Amino acid sequence: MFKQKRQWWWVIGTCIALSGVALVRLLAPEYPPGALRLAIKIGGYTLVIIGLFSLPLAMQKDDE
């Protein structure tokens, strides 16, 4: 059961991190320099960090 949960953590963490990369690399350059572009980049980098920090949850050992 826990192994299946770990697989979901891998999928969720990877999707979150990749969505942050998409924000920073694809969406932010479309906007002119300013506060909105900066906010999109900050949000994207935050998503990348959250995604990467959720991956260790997938690597935890079983307690059973």
Image (tube, rainbow, N blue to C red):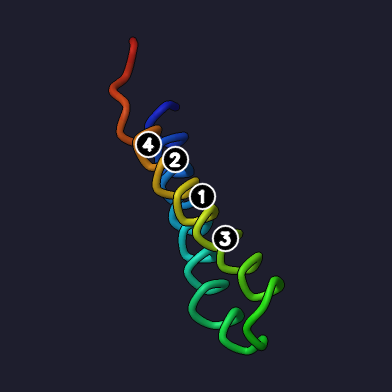
Q: Nearer the viewer, residue 42 or 47?
A: 42
Per the model, the C-alpha gap separating discs 1 and 2 is 8 Å
- Residue under numbered circle 2: 54
Per the model, the C-alpha gap separating discs 4 and 3 is 25 Å
Q: Residue at x 48, y 79 (%)?
A: 25
Per the model, the C-alpha gap separating discs 3 and 1 is 20 Å
Query: From the viewer's perspective, is the residue at label 2 or at label 3 nearer?
Result: 3
Query: From the viewer's perspective, is the residue at label 4 or at label 2 nearer?
Result: 2
Is 26 displayed left or right of 60 in the figure? Answer: right
Is 22 displayed left or right of 53 in the figure? Answer: right
Q: Amino acid at mark 4?
A: Ala
Q: Residue at x 51, y 50 (%)?
A: 12
Query: From the viewer's perspective, is the residue at label 1 or at label 2 nearer?
Result: 2
Please identify the quarter of the rendering in which residue 33 is found. bottom right
Query: From the viewer's perspective, is the residue at label 4 or at label 3 nearer?
Result: 3
Q: Residue at x 69, y 71 (%)?
A: 35
Describe the element under mark 4 as helix, strand or loop.
helix
Residue 1 horizontal/vertical position (percent): 44, 27
Q: Are marks 2 and 3 in contact (CB under 8 Å)?
A: no
2 or 3: tag closer to the N-terminus: 3
Q: Are marks 4 and 2 in contact (CB under 8 Å)?
A: yes
Q: Are marks 4 and 3 in contact (CB under 8 Å)?
A: no
Describe the element under mark 3 as helix, strand or loop.
helix
- Residue under numbered circle 1: 12
- Residue under numbered circle 4: 58
1 or 4: tag closer to the N-terminus: 1
Q: Is residue 11 above or below residue 36?
A: above
Q: Is residue 21 above or below residue 15?
A: below
Describe the element under mark 2 as helix, strand or loop.
helix
- Residue under numbered circle 3: 42
Per the model, the C-alpha gap separating discs 4 and 2 is 7 Å
Q: Residue furthest front?
A: 34
